[in-house]
Image (spheres, helix red, strand yellow):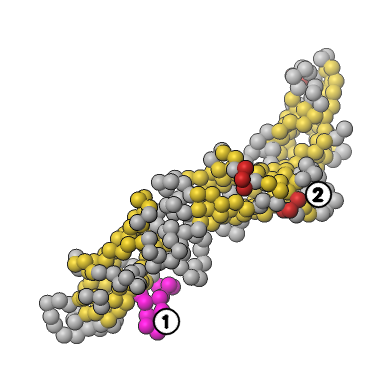
Amino acid sequence: MQRKLVALVFIGTIFFALPVLAQSNSIGTSALTISAAPAYPSPNTTVTLTAESPLLDLQNSTITWVVNGATVGTGISTKVQLGAVGKETDVSVSVSGPSGSDSASLALVPTSIDLLWEGDSYVPPFYKGRAVPGSNSSIRVLAIPHFITTSGKGVASSNIQFTWSVNGAVDRAQSGVGESSAIFPAAVLYGNDTIDVVARSTDGSLSGEASIVVPTQNPQLVLYEDNPLFGIMYHRPLSQSSTANESETSFAAVPYFSNAKSANDTSLAYNWTVNGSAVAADPKDPSEITITTKSAGIANIALSIVNAFDPFFSASGSWQVSFTGASGTGSDQFHSSSQ
């Protein structure tokens, strides 16, 4: 009786491509089986098939491989080119020799999965990238399986059993039929998390596995001008050396990928300095600072942020801003509006 070996590939998402998790599965009689490597290959890729037997002397036997009705080779192993997603490739192998004769067959049916992930860390409105996990944040993962039967019908996620694991430990609470998404805590101390999902149709006809490695990253502190007419200029972050044309300019700090709900989250403590002097943050808007100049010159802005509930969190940055639109003199050229 012909059984089916289903091959699954992990296909690249809209963000980037990720590798297939290769395994070796055997299917056949107790005397003769066929292993495929990788066990979950991509559609339109090559699979290496190997005949295995604990009873037959394969080295001194005649071995013949047949793919889709055509003889393709002899020997213990052969290579097979697979078709598109859901397209079945039928394989059989026959062995004949002094130790006996036997045969085995299988069907390779490629499937695919899109595995999407993002962190729940903070990013500003209209951010076009993906939020990556930071210290003490979480990782949201969504598996989108593309399981197509040989008759051409797709299998819905509601009819697929998902088994999630992180760093080798199965998360049974988030696994089950239709459980195509999961949330995991990010790695502590900015390490890596390996997240796996095994997907299997409820009728057992299609199955596969996908894996990703998600790094936890340090927060990134970026400073922007807060324009009185246009708001925060997210499209134009300040470089290490920038120019301000107005005698009074507001700046907004954005702690990308921090474990916060907003830039002014109460868990974040902002420590501003201008030209080495501490500047008290506005309790209502601590992520922003307004600098008024009495004359043209350079303001050296420095900022460090800590999180009251996360001892591993820290972010800092410094910027040199040249004010060109000011006039007048005075020993105290720069001061913030909060002073």
Which percent across, then down, holds residue 319?
28, 67
**In this rendering, would 268 be left or right of 74?**
left
Which percent across, then down, holds residue 287?
35, 69
Q: Residue at x 23, y 72 (%)?
A: 299
Q: Residue at x 82, y 53 (%)?
A: 152
User: Outermost residue, left direction?
Assistant: 331
Q: Quadrant of the N terminus?
A: top right
Name the element at disc 2: loop
Determine which residue is flagged by label 1.
230
Rendered view: 210 above or below 299: above
N-term-proximal mark, 2 vs 1: 2
- Say which amino acid is labelled 1: Phe
Which stretch is magenta?
225-236
Q: Is residue 227 magenta?
A: yes
Decide which of 282, 151 is in the foreground and name it: 282
- Say which amino acid is labelled 2: Thr
- Count every numbered label the image shows and give the total: 2
Which percent across, then down, holds residue 169?
56, 39
Rendered view: 89 above or below 129: above
Which percent across, then down, holds residue 270?
31, 64
User: Which of the 4 quarters of the picture holds residue 203?
Assistant: top right
